Image (spheres, grey):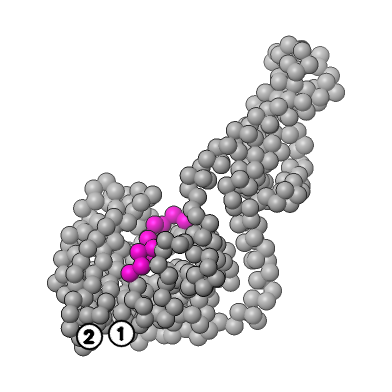
Amino acid sequence: MGKILAAEPRAHRFRFTRPLLELLYNLRTAGDSPGRQAAAVGVGVFIGCTPFFGFHLALCVGLARLFRLNQIKTYLASHISIPVIWPFLILAEVQVGRRLRGAPFLALHLADLRRVGLRTFGLDLLAGSAVVGGVLSICFALLTYLLVCRRRRASAVESLIDETSRRYIDAGVFSWEFVRGKLRHDPVYFALLARGDLPPTGRLLDLGCGRGILLSLLATARAQAARGVYPESWPTPPPGLQLHGIEGSLKIARAARLALGEEATIEVGDLRETPLPDADAVYLLDVLHYLPAAEQERLLDRVAAAMPKGGGGLLILREADAAGGAAFVRTRLAEQFCALARGHFRQRFHFRSDAEWRRLLEERGFVVGSLPMSAGTPYANVLIEGRRAGGRRQSGR
């Protein structure tokens, strides 16, 4: 049987660490508009080009706070003067400074260097750093602005990313950075939200829910839609849908529980054995390939038994397409690398082609369709949708 996690006492357990984590989150995410990100990089690069070594951090923090820029990004951009680069940077600045006052370029000979006084050298360096730093800061700022605009989403979507990832502050820095990264770079979450396939009532069951990213996104979307901060072209997420997740790892499930509180039921259990509650929509995102072939089919049998044969029962799979060529090879290598990074040295995978996945669902009474789900990634993922056709809910198997 699966284990239902009790609610975590957030207020007492995290009363000391929460303010620090909030501060870190705000430092990490402040000033995320394209203009402010470009300005943060430009200011950081300019400071990094100045000869005020030892004071770069203080200058970055001070100017970033003054202009309400992201302090971390400003300071990171100042590292243009890393040890490998700074000798060439200083040389370029001194040469530019000399040309500004009409002096010839400085020859790189010891005798010439000795003839240049320390005061003159410092003035040349200071003047040159203003010019070189100004040019580089403008170039880096423009490049940052173009890159951010290219990847920028609508403000309502950005708000969904921020508010969903903020739910994971209590779960730790890694969790909220992980969730933030997944929402930004994995296309499946917002594709599911924008499709509007969810039933208006009943239970949504997320099998292998991990940190509950999909459930947290749905809960956040409900709250945002109620406040009117939601993409106008997207259907409103159903407020009456019960959210239920099952996850095999207790540690990861606790992160989901901290993020969702009483808004969802998070159960810990092995998907191969844990009884499945009745569900009107079931999601299996990047889960089935971890199971042997026979266990994949048994789990799909149990999912089909838990769903209504009619009335909008929905099954959504996201899996790698084993017929995806080079993209599938990259997917398999990425999965193997992640398994090794988690210490799962004996992890085995069983991938199938898109056609095989669709056949398995059709054999279980689903009307099936599929579409690519790897936009913006190098992988061979497909989203497979199955709907039950006619009749009543099956009895459990």
Q: Say which residue appears at 30% left-offset and 84% top-offset.
A: 278
Quarter of the view holding residue 96:
top right
Tell me the distance, in whole angstroms, between the alpha carbons under discs 2 and 1: 9 Å
Percent position of residue 332, x then y: 30, 54
> Taking the image as drawn, is residue 249 in sight?
no
The magenta span reads 184-197
Percent position of residue 239, x then y: 44, 78
Label 1: which residue? 278
Q: Say which residue appears at 76% left-offset and 41% top-offset.
A: 54
Q: Would residue 239 appear left or right of 393 to someone viewing this image?
A: right
Amino acid at circle 2:
Arg
Q: Would residue 256 appear left or right of 113 to someone viewing this image?
A: left
Q: Would residue 136 appear left or right of 103 to someone viewing this image?
A: left
Task: Name above or below for residue 190 compared with residue 315.
Answer: above
Label 2: which residue? 393
SS of the residue under disc 1: loop
Percent position of residue 294, x then y: 19, 72
Percent position of residue 298, x then y: 21, 76
Q: Earlier in the sequence, mark 2 or mark 1?
A: 1
Q: Would residue 338 appear left or right of 99 to someone viewing this image?
A: left
Which quadrant does the C terminus fall into? bottom left
> Is 346 or 47 nearer to us in this picture?
47
Q: Say which residue appears at 32% left-offset and 85% top-offset.
A: 277
